[in-house]
Amino acid sequence: MTIKEIFDSMDYGTAPESASEAMAWIHDHGATFGLFIDGAWTKPGDTFETKNPATGEVLAKITQAGADDVDAAVRAARKAQPGWAKLSGHQRARKLYALARLVQKHARLFAVLETLDNGKPIRESRDIDIPLVARHFYYHAGMAQLQDAELPDREALGVAGQIIPWNFPLLMLAWKIAPAIAMGNTVVLKPAEYTSLTALFFAQICDEAGLPKGVVNIVTGDGAVGEAITAHEGIDKIAFTGSTDVGRIIRKATAGTGKSLTLELGGKSPYIVFDDADLDSAVEGLVDAIWFNQGQVCCAGSRLLVHEPVAERFYTKLKARMAKLRVGDPLDKSIDVGALVDPVQHDRVSKLVEAGAAEGDVFQAPAEMPATGCYYPPTLITGMSPAASLMQEEIFGPVLVATTFRIPEEAVAIANNTRYGLAATLWSENVNLALDIAPKLAAGVVWVNGTNMFDAAAGFGGVRESGFGREGGWEGLLAYTKPKRKPATLKPIPAVAAPKGAKVDELDRTAKLYIGGKQARPDGGYSKPVWSKSGALLGHVSLANRKDVRNAVEAATGAAGWARTTGHARAQILYYIGENLSARADEFASRINALTGGRSGRAEVERSIDRLFTYAAWADKYDGAAKPVPLRGVALAMNEPVGVIGQFCPDDHPLLGLVSLIAPAIAMGNRVVAVASEPFPLAAADFYQVLETSDLPGGVVNILTGSHAELAKPLAGHLGVDAVWSASGADMSSLIEYESAGNLKRTWVNHAIDRDWMGAEGEGREFLAQATEVKTVWVPYGE
């Protein structure tokens, strides 16, 4: 081709990256790899092949770990963990710094290995993935350095089991290992079966960095290895990134084990283009949103929502850009779209498109497709309805589905019409519109006039069935630490039994339920007596059932406007509740003494008033943050309410326990369905009379009474509930966690560990963190 022809066609020339160094490293290991356990390589056992998806050629043989191997890795990690945690933050920081430097030193080799094993273009591995890996280790070296001073009341969880996907093999490893070991945990990590090579090379640099034996252990293999890690009794924490279906299985498998859990799961992220957007920039952003890594990205902008006035013009520009996309050898630096990771994934994408394409108009990029390898053409399907199967299901490939909207409210409604909630992108030159829409989107991350922006300083994670927990930033450290506390076993308190030959000298009082701001009779029509220890009948209490749970959740859902009130307005109401409780302090103190048979009623009431004032103070002071991300712009970490929270109150403090759960939740803008203390429920019935006179909107707080064990399943399993907290004396942590898997709601349960409700353990930032989701909104600025 002559120079004139090149300028006429503007074709790229090839720019192949050599794979010789990467292949030499593989062959130096005999093209067969064992496991990395306790700082040493095991002899290879039964193996499976890992292939280059661009060519189908075998790269190496990888050991299939067994249950005994997982057990050995966990024992090594358990043995190493106390010593690693006892090191100073500075000592751990030096090791993470060494890892960061070694990642940079071997950056080219890491990038080529990643591309060979995964099929993504070398430009993405080299310019995005590997620099972010180094950034995470640098950032968390700093976190380790600051731990002693900034997190003095928190400590490591112990041994973390980590299971990562094949789409970002090394980056996901860094997201998980860096914060875990920075905080003093040790790790057993399983890379994806398709893409183990960079994890194995990372094991090598752990040795080079002088990381103590057992701090990082790498076990390879198929899903059975992940199951063994999840089930192992020596694991304290499971961190999983992968599909929603597998995440649901893991949630059920870990229920009741006491393991901490974070899940970063699937997504069907909206990409919203308003009519005032810079359309050319939005097109370029969309190329990155959906064809980055061949669309094999959990937060890919796979649902395009275009404002009707500019839809046809935008589609025309997009198709013209698609026509210039280059598909081919991922090691060619001029290639835009590489190979899907495996023939299995290629077949899945093909079948989904074949089944759903008839619901819209299909356009595929006219790119020249290689004769061999797992390649799929960039695809656009327009004219879809929001309910179409391809608009709802995660395809995980280079396929974009599109629809239009007329007004911003419709855009929000379509964007949120999904079971997922991982990320969202919106394009508009109107900053007022952008910042109005961003908080309304059900997503853990929102990008304004940009896409796929990531950094170690900014939390990443989802809501709904995209999982829970955050990775990155200060919020990410909560997933690998716990409050320093001496655990005490919780002793359930039985209700006082009816005395023999009991006589009732006066009319009894039957307390109703409190639903939607009104007293309500129980659906089943049943109640039970409540006796004092001296044998006096204190009253009757309603027994709620699953239909009462349904009614209470409906009332809470209908009070969604509470989340949009200002922190100042919520604070005023909490102060007012405290004021009205104070006016009836003597009455409540007497009631608590009668219920419990003790003399601590006055102290409990005073602490309850104090706690209401505490959360009134926090209502407008639990700040977000502007994260110091390395771009000209800002990443805003905004604390948003979780939604509807189900709560089971502690047995022993019938008023304080109720207030300690309700107050932080509503202070942050949530609505609650609280189940009162089971042995002493009448204090809660008295308390809702205070709520009735305190200007609290109906449905914000709903109070049920009855058996915790019987109400746990319908409340934890309700798909309209976004989180469940349990401080109950009943043994139901396992049941709540298991039932929560339906919509993957957050849970915060006690696992039969007691809490000092009168002391500092009964309030504070731990409660506020459980009452909020961190949404990260990225806003780049400049022309």
Image (spheres, rainbow, N blue to C red):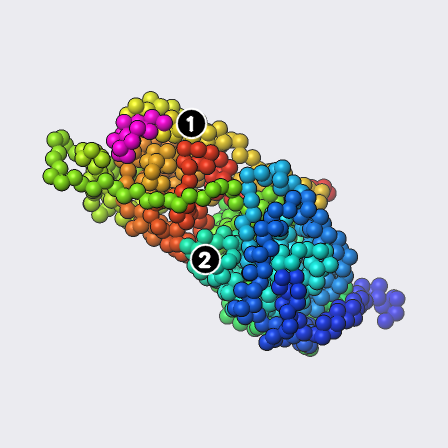
Q: Is residue 1 above or below residue 98?
A: below
Residue lying at 61% horizontally and 75% vertically, measured from the top left: 45
Which residue is at the far top? 583
Amino acid type, callout 2:
Thr
Numbered tag placed on residue 610 in the rendering: 1
Q: Is 599 one of the magenta-colored residues?
A: yes
Dot 2 or dot 1: first in sequence order is: 2
Q: Please, what secondary structure does the residue beneath circle 1 have?
A: helix
The residue where tag 2 is placed is 254
Hey, which quadrant is residue 371 in on the image?
Answer: bottom right
Task: Report the front residue among 512 and 761.
Answer: 761
Determine crowd level at label 2: few under 14, some 14-19, many 20+ residues with C-alpha closer than 10 A. Answer: many
Question: Mark 1 packing: few (<14 Cα in 10 Å), some, or many (20+)?
Answer: some
- What secondary structure is the stretch in magenta mostly built from? helix
In the image as oriented, which residue stretches furthest toward the right? 3
Point out residue 46 in the picture as x, y percentages from the top left corner.
Answer: 59, 76
Q: CA distance from mark 2 to mark 1?
A: 37 Å
Tell me the residue at 53%/31% (across/down).
Answer: 621
Quadrant of residue 539 within the rendered picture: top left
In the shown orientation, is residue 323 left or right of residue 245?
right
Q: Which mark is residue 325?
A: none
Name the residue: 61% across, 69% down: 194
Tell me which segment is drawn in magenta.
Answer: 588-603
